[in-house]
């Protein structure tokens, strides 16, 4: 696609902030095209976002506008439509493919707006559709897609074969945390310094809260995530040089005293468009080839970005708008107030109290607490998957519609009945005990199902299997666990206990 003429205004959404969104060599605007950014207050009225998330988005947008200088017009408006009208009237505008169904429908309805191809991903929409159509829409598997991306982008390959002879090194990347260690002992992640722009953003958010039409949840401490391209590159450099070597082995582990472990904390930068996925995976690959990072760590990181992130993005668009309404398990229970307010779990379960506190204070926790604690709890208790999806979207600094719909509806809540993953991702307390240090100081015992010492996850796991016994009995990866119900002598007591809790 050729670049637009120099006079056509190019609109940058708040998650399209990197240089690859204004690159004419890849179908972007002319190098001298005027740019437009619109800060819509209505975005923050529609959802009760985490305060730290609102701060990060506005800080990133305003920092980018300051970098672009006179080339950009930055409009603060009630709505995007009002901002466009103020900035350009009916003049033509280009914009890269937005990242949500709602935003895409909005720009498609504007006759003056021309949509350019999506940026910020390794695989194009047409290429994914051809791959997916060849596999059958009901049988898409991330592992197949990941191998295809590895081959087509020559990532961690030795000729036609995967480096080390195996595509998947998950077996090497599921080590429990070192027993007795309060942390992994790795260098801390990159943390940015706030600027006068952050002070301005915080003052505006305070004012919006006082005026009462915008409400937030969570705390807005010192900004913990990059808001500029320069900061994002510094975060990437620190990760690959100092934290990548220990990432792989412990990527599924949790420690109460080490919330970040060896994780990259780059998801918010990628999702704001400050980093391009290609540069992230290429740097990790280079560290492995130079002997500075083990293969299992490089492969685990490449899998997260070139495998899972890409897959989630494309599944979101391939399955369409109706996918978010999937509810194969017919879960309808509302989210409790303590959960939506990010308050401590009233049961006092140590793992939940700890992780919810982390989300409340930072708007972030890594993927295992998200999936195997927060998501697993919602699944076991039968909470409405659409409400759970919205909660994850609002509560995490890296949460966007395209991120959370597949991750929550498909993987976490199994609400699509298996279109995206082969099994529900949930467990009893034994898994949490093995992969963390949360259980020892907890009032509950991970092996106990019934009574005052019963672990909520252990009891919830067996209750979930019982509720959906007929469905899970026909799932090859769940049938053995379902048969275990017949060996529980206390099943009736467990079910009565769980009914009392729900009441």
Image: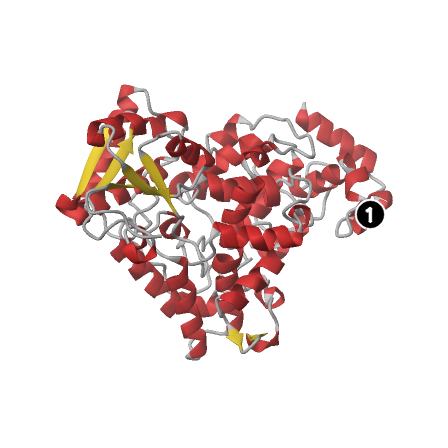
Q: Residue at x 61, y 39 (%)?
A: 377
Given residues 247 and 153, the one toward you in this image is: 153
- State the scheme by which the image is colored: secondary structure
Q: Residue at x 86, y 43 (%)?
A: 486
Q: Residue at x 18, y 38 (%)?
A: 73
Query: Would you name the residue on which mark 1 appears?
Result: 484
Is residue 478 found left or right of 433 in the rendered image? right
Which x, y percent locates residue 468?
76, 37
Q: Residue at x 22, y 28 (%)?
A: 89
Is residue 288 visible to us here?
A: yes
Is residue 489 found left or right of 353 in the rendered image? right
Is residue 103 found left or right of 79 in the rendered image? right
| Rendered view: 450 above or below 483 | above
Which residue lies most toward the top here?
212
Is residue 217 visible to us here?
A: no
Which x, y percent locates residue 281?
43, 64
């Amino acid at each position: 696609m050729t670049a637009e003429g120099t006079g056509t205004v190019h609109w940058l959404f708040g998650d399209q902030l990197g240089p690859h969104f204004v690159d004419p060599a890849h179908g972007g605007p002319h190098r001298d095209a005027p740019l437009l950014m619109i800060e819509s207050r209505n975005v923050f009225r529609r959802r009760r976002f985490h305060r730290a998330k609102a701060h990060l988005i506005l800080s990133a947008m305003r920092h980018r506008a300051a970098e672009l200088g006179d080339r950009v017009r930055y409009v603060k408006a009630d709505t995007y439509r009002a901002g466009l009208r103020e900035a350009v009237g009916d003049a033509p505008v280009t914009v890269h493919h937005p990242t949500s169904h709602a935003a895409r429908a909005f720009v498609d309805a504007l006759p003056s707006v021309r949509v350019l191809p999506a940026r910020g991903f390794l695989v194009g929409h047409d290429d994914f559709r051809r791959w997916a159509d060849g596999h059958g829409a009901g049988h898409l598997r991330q592992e197949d897609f990941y191998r295809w991306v590895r081959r087509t982008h020559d990532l961690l390959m030795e000729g036609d074969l995967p480096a080390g002879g195996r595509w998947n090194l998950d077996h090497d990347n599921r080590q429990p945390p070192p027993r007795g260690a309060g942390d992994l002992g790795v260098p801390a992640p990159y943390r940015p310094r706030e600027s006068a722009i952050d002070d301005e953003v915080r003052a505006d958010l305070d004012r919006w809260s006082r005026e009462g039409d915008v409400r937030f949840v969570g705390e807005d401490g010192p900004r913990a995530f990059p808001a500029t391209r320069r900061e994002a590159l510094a975060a990437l450099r620190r990760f690959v040089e100092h934290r990548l070597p220990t990432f792989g082995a412990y990527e599924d582990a949790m420690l109460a005293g080490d919330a970040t472990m060896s994780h990259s904390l780059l998801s918010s930068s990628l999702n704001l468009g400050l980093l391009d996925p290609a540069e992230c995976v290429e740097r990790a690959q280079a560290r492995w080839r130079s002997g500075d990072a083990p293969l299992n760590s490089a492969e685990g990181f490449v899998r997260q970005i070139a495998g899972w992130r890409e897959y989630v993005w494309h599944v979101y668009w391939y399955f369409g708008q109706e996918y978010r309404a999937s509810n194969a398990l017919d879960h309808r229970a509302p989210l409790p107030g303590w959960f939506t307010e990010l308050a401590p779990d009233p049961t006092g379960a140590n793992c939940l109290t700890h992780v919810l506190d982390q989300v409340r204070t930072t708007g972030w926790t890594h993927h295992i607490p998200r999936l195997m604690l927060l998501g697993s709890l919602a699944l076991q208790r039968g909470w409405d998957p659409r409400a759970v999806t919205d909660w994850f979207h609002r509560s995490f600094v890296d949460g966007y519609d395209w991120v959370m719909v597949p991750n929550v509806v498909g993987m976490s809540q199994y609400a699509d009945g298996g279109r995206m993953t082969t099994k529900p991702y949930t467990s009893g307390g034994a898994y949490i005990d093995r992969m963390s240090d949360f259980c020892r100081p907890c009032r509950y015992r991970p092996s106990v199902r019934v009574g005052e010492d019963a672990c909520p996850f252990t009891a919830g796991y067996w209750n979930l299997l019982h509720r959906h016994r007929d469905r899970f009995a026909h799932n090859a990866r769940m049938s053995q666990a379902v048969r275990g119900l017949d060996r529980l002598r206390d099943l009736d007591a467990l079910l009565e206990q769980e009914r009392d809790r729900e009441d």
